[in-house]
Image (cartoon, rainbow, N blue to C red):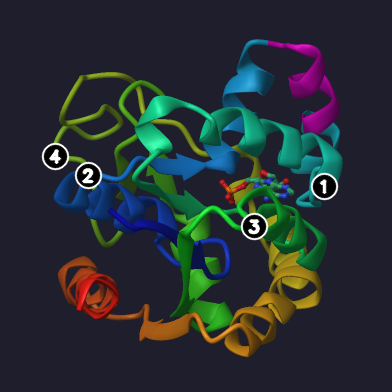
């Protein structure tokens, strides 16, 4: 059976985490977020976490070598054999090249999906975002607040605001996105494995577009 790697490309706040999880539960591929892995390392105060934190708190990128090593380690696990969904990786052309080399000649199909959202919408989304540190569920203070106020509806944990979701850090993250990550759109366009979906509607509408792009790819692949 052929294998599929879905790359969710899009600025911070585009909804890659939410959409990736939904895709994962429907299609059975694990959804892997380098941001989540790095935040866990920061929480556990590992050497990686201490190094990563210096970059993350300021909205910059963690050096390619560190992130590439994390991804290599994660992708060798058994649950990735059939394929996987990447949320937040690659973020630079060097990372994309690393990923390509890792799977050269392995029969892995790549599909990069760009989620389109305007900067002003992203700023509102990110600065109002709250998340559950326990189960990962994401809320928004205006558009999708928890029915339990400051606690998670699913597991009752106290919701948190990410340190990098403040206005200043969000602006920096967007700048980094435009400078380092946006060029990946051309990179994947050139490789013929790029699709774009609108990212400003409801979570359900966005998911419908995403799902149909993935289904098309799977159908085209097996025919
Ligand atoms: P995210 O949760 O994807 O928005 O990532 C949060 C932060 O983790 C980013 O602002 C970066 O500092 C760091 N990070 C996550 N993924 C990567 C990556 N692929 N390359 C470099 N830094 C990353």
Residue 141 seen from this side: no
Q: Residues within 10 Å of mark 1 (few under 14, many from 20)?
A: some
Q: Nearer the viewer, residue 122 or 46?
A: 46
Q: Tell me which label, 2 or 4, sits earlier in the chain.
A: 2
User: What is the C-alpha distance between the residues marked 4 and 1?
Assistant: 39 Å
Marks counted in the figure total: 4
Q: Comparing marks 1 and 2, which lies closer to the viewer? A: 2
The residue located at (24%, 29%) in the rendering is 152
> Measured from the top left, where is residue 160 in percent x and y?
45, 31
Residue picked out by circle 2: 28
- Which segment did they paint magenta? 45-52
Residue 49 part of the magenta segment: yes
Q: Residues within 10 Å of mark 3 (few under 14, many from 20)?
A: few
Q: Tell me which label, 1 or 3, sits earlier in the chain.
A: 1
Q: Tell me which label, 3 or 2, sits earlier in the chain.
A: 2
> Measured from the top left, where is residue 74 in percent x and y?
55, 30
Picture layout, residue 83 above or below residue 51: below
Q: Comparing marks 4 and 3, which lies closer to the viewer? A: 3
User: What is the C-alpha distance between the residues marked 4 and 3?
Assistant: 47 Å
Residue picked out by circle 4: 147
Q: Comparing marks 3 and 2, which lies closer to the viewer? A: 3
The part of the image, by quadrant, that contains residue 16 is: bottom left
User: What is the C-alpha distance between the residues marked 3 and 2?
Assistant: 23 Å
Q: Comparing marks 2 and 4, which lies closer to the viewer? A: 2
In the rendered image, the quadrant that contains the C terminus is bottom left
Q: Is residue 82 left or right of residue 174?
A: left
Residue picked out by circle 1: 64
> Measured from the top left, where is residue 37 in percent x and y?
57, 30
Picture layout, residue 106 above or below residue 11: above
The residue located at (54%, 53%) in the rendering is 106
């Amino acid at each position: 059976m052929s294998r599929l790697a879905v790359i969710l490309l899009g600025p911070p706040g585009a909804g890659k985490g939410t959409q990736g999880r939904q895709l994962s539960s429907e299609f059975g591929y694990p959804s892997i977020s380098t941001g989540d892995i790095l935040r866990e390392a920061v929480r556990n105060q590992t050497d990686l976490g201490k190094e990563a934190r210096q970059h993350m708190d300021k909205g910059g990128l963690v050096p390619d070598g560190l992130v590439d090593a994390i991804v290599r380690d994660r992708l060798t696990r058994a649950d990735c054999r059939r394929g996987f969904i990447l949320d937040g990786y690659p973020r630079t052309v060097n990372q994309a090249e690393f990923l390509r080399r890792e799977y050269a000649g392995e029969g892995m199909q790549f599909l990069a999906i760009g989620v389109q959202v305007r900067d002003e919408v992203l700023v509102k989304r990110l600065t109002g975002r709250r998340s559950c540190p326990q189960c990962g569920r994401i809320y928004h203070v205006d558009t999708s607040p928890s029915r339990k106020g400051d606690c998670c509806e699913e597991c009752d944990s106290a919701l948190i605001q990410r340190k990098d979701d403040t206005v200043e850090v969000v602006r920096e993250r967007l700048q980094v996105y435009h400078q380092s990550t946006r060029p990946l759109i051309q990179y994947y366009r050139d490789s013929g494995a790029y699709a774009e979906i609108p990212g400003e509607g409801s979570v359900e509408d966005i998911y419908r577009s995403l799902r149909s792009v993935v289904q098309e790819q799977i159908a085209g692949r097996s025919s």
